[in-house]
């Protein structure tokens, strides 16, 4: 098993024979046109029931499909069976209804995509051994359930690279062109359709304008063709300066007539090739990228420019809120500057200025995919504008798939968070499903970044995050542990030990990572300048982008209060603002996010901040130390290839968690000069240092930063 089929393995289940009498023997596909999602559904059902139970479904001519599985849309069913009355609860776009009575199974979608989702859902249930009679209706909570890929498309030098991708080369691009062989792109679409995703933005938000070349647009259409049988639409990232960089115009001012014409022409050309394109994703005026602010235009001017070109095609323009330009080059502490404030400031006054087909895509927290962030306050400011949350499946700051970090519990906390807008219940999930502010095209975007590696993300266990993302995008009421159980059964097996061990590892993994990386809301403490990987707490304060931990000899944390700090707490609705403004009411896990305190500040637990730091780093890494042993208890119960692959990574994670623990603890011991009450930090008397051994073929190397190696030395 190499992971390629992920949770769609359709592996035989135990006691398959016992179920035979209850299984369909025929198949009625209500649309047999090749390439239609319903015909894809029929193929999956044949393959799935064949794999799981060994049944061979015969195409059945009988339109009602007794002892058969019938799949199609409600309208197709009614057309084929004009005299049959069926009662189906209300279906929303992409929703489905499944009815199982013995071997007669009806899977009907509101549209073809819904029928395909229904087929996958049915297969997932039977693959978990559920063949009893049931009837269920499922509707997605929101229409935007997108995936973003950060695949690079430049000519020359990139070799199919994926920005922040840890699963190998792009499945779409190679050297500035679209791959000839798009098999993997099709397999990816299959995986995504099975979890209810309806669009993929295929190129990096740091977009390159050359893809607008007509020949490349033709090839982009090939990707869309591979997606279509799975009901997946193609989305496309744009470079805001393309009119100048690619079109040869002297400007890219969004209000300039020639610029408007340029973009209309691009949109017309793309839709001529891809009539069902989902729309655009735009990163502008961010991290040095061009944008409307270059011309003193507003972000709404920027978003509307694209939105208007899309309207006649029903396309949407997703405009990212990750906009900031603050750089502090002299590196002195500016107590009022705060990148976390940027989005709300830039969007201020724009709420009623966006075209109706604009969706503002907001990272879950106000900074950047950290291990713990409060919900972005921007969600409470945009009330007339559709919004989508941006979650990150690729674990950029969270261990880059070399560490197991199951993210669903984090997402659950964020989605359940009540922003109390106007002192009314305002859970993030209710803003995203459109119910809180009555928005029509809100939803979810996940930065996934799969690659050509057969594990997709670079690690088998990381795939639970992709699976969970789809489930949350479909329904925020999903439960992280239930999702995990399902995923384990489908991906590995329903063996009790396998379920117990993978659940134990996964459910402990986010708290463990938070503990051994950066806790109390201090951010991840990963190296901030280069790879965003591994411990480098010093880099947080020594960079111009303003992500400051503001640690000195006596104090630590970022004062984001209105009273003394950057005012960020005041960007939240009043009840939440006052909670974060006061140290007493700020939850410990966000204490250092909102407050600058002495290391000796007491937490609610009674511990000091510094002692909590030390203890948490020991506890977190102690948990990671248990992972390899737990996994080893599954030897023989998991196929060899995946067993070895996962074990290798867990052993690495256990070791790297020690590096994290010691680096962070040493750094703060050095800063604060407050010893660990338990005498552990900086005490290496039982450790044999590599540099003190007899070295053959190695030499001693001075490590910088010092805290990354005991005694600041390593061997190379
Ligand atoms: C940062 C990533 C960078 C992205 C940027 C973004 O490090 O690769 O381009 O976010 O989201 O976290 O635009």
Image: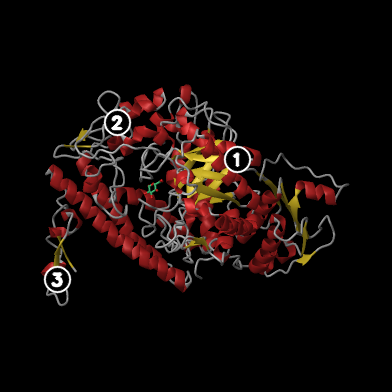
Q: Which label was assigned to residue 560?
A: 2
Quarter of the image that includes the C terminus:
bottom left
- Closest to the observer, 65 or 323: 323
Q: Closer to the N terminus: mark 3 or mark 1?
A: 1
Which residue does the image show at 40% across and 23% down from the upper left?
A: 574
Comparing labels 3 and 1, the label whose residue is closer to the camera: 1
Disc 2 crowd rating (10 Å Cα; few below 14, some 14-19, many 20+) is many
Which residue does the image show at 59% across and 61% down from the upper left?
A: 186
Residue 426 against residue 656 in the figure, above or below: above
From the Cβ of disc 3, is ligand 1 less than 8 Å away?
no
Gap in angstroms between the C-alphas marked 3 and 1: 61 Å
Q: Closer to the N terminus: mark 2 or mark 1?
A: 1
Q: Which residue is mark 3?
A: 699
SS of the residue under disc 3: loop
Judge from the rendering whether residue 594 lies leftward or rightward of residue 124; answer left or right: left
Gap in angstroms between the C-alphas marked 2 and 1: 40 Å
Gap in angstroms between the C-alphas marked 2 and 3: 46 Å
Residue 514, position in %: x, y?
Answer: 33, 48
Q: Which residue is mark 1?
A: 310
Residue 519, position in %: x, y?
Answer: 29, 44
């Amino acid at each position: 098993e190499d992971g390629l089929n992920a949770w769609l393995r359709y592996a035989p289940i135990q006691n398959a024979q016992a179920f035979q009498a209850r299984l369909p023997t025929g198949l009625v596909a209500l649309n047999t046109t090749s390439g239609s999602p319903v015909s894809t559904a029929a193929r999956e059902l044949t393959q799935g029931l064949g794999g799981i139970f060994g049944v061979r479904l015969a195409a059945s001519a009988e339109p009602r499909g007794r002892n058969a599985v019938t799949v199609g849309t409600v309208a197709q069913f009614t057309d084929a069976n004009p005299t049959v009355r069926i009662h189906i609860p209300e279906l929303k776009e992409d929703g489905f209804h499944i009815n199982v009575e013995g071997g007669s199974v009806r899977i009907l979608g509101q549209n073809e995509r819904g029928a395909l989702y229904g087929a996958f859902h049915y297969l997932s249930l039977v693959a978990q051994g559920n063949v009893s009679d049931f009837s269920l209706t499922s509707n997605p909570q929101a229409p935007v359930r997108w995936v973003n890929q950060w695949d690079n498309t430049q000519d020359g030098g990139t070799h199919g690279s994926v920005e922040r991708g840890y699963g190998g080369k792009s499945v779409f691009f190679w050297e500035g062109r679209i791959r000839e062989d798009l098999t993997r792109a099709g397999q990816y679409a299959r995986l995504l359709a099975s979890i209810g995703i309806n669009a993929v933005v295929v190129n990096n938000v740091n977009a390159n304008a050359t893809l607008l070349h007509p020949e490349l647009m033709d090839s982009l259409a090939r990707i869309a063709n591979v997606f279509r049988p799975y009901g997946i639409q193609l989305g496309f990232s744009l470079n805001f300066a393309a009119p100048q960089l690619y079109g040869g115009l002297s400007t890219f001012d969004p209000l300039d007539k020639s610029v408007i014409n340029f973009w209309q022409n691009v949109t017309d050309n793309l839709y001529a090739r891809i009539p069902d394109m989902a729309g655009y994703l735009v990163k502008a005026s961010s991290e040095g990228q061009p944008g409307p602010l270059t011309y003193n235009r507003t972000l709404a001017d920027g978003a509307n420019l694209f939105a208007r070109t899309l309207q006649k095609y029903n396309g949407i323009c997703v405009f990212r809120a990750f906009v900031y330009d603050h750089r502090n080059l002299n590196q002195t502490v500016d107590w009022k500057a705060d990148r976390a404030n940027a989005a709300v400031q830039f969007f201020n006054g724009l709420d009623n200025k966006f075209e109706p087909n604009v969706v503002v895509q907001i990272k879950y927290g106000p900074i950047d995919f950290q291990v713990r962030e409060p919900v972005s306050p921007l969600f409470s400011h945009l009330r007339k504008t559709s919004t989508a949350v941006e979650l990150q499946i690729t674990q950029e700051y969270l261990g880059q798939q070399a560490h197991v970090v199951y993210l669903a519990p984090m997402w659950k906390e964020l989605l359940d968070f009540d922003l109390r807008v106007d002192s009314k219940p305002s859970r993030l999930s209710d803003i995203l499903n459109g119910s809180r502010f009555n928005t029509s095209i809100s939803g979810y975007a996940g930065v996934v970044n799969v690659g050509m590696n057969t594990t997709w993300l670079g690690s088998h266990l990381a795939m639970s995050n992709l699976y969970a993302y789809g489930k949350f995008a479909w329904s925020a009421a999903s439960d992280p542990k239930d999702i995990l159980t399902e995923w384990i059964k489908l991906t590995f097996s329903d063996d009790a030990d396998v379920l117990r061990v993978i659940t134990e590892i996964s459910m402990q993994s986010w708290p463990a990572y938070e503990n051994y990386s950066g806790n109390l809301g201090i951010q991840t403490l990963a190296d901030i300048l280069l790879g965003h990987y591994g411990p480098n707490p010093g880099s947080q304060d020594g960079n111009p982008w303003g992500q400051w931990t503001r640690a000195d000899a006596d104090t630590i944390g970022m004062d984001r209060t209105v009273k003394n700090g950057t005012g960020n707490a005041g960007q939240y609705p009043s009840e939440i603002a006052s909670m974060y403004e006061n140290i007493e009411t700020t939850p410990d896990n966000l204490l250092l996010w909102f407050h600058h305190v002495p290391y000796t500040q007491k937490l609610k637990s009674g511990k000091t901040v510094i002692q909590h730091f030390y203890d948490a780093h020991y506890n977190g890494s102690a948990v990671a130390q248990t992972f390899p042993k737990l996994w080893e208890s599954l030897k023989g119960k998991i196929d060899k290839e995946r067993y070895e692959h996962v074990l290798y990574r867990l052993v690495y994670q256990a070791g790297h968690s020690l590096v994290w623990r010691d680096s962070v603890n040493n750094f703060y011991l050095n800063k604060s000069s407050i010893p660990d009450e338990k005498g552990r930090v900086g005490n290496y008397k039982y450790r044999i240092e590599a540099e003190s051994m007899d070295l053959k073929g190695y030499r001693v190397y001075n490590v910088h930063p010092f805290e990354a190696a005991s005694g600041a030395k390593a061997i190379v």
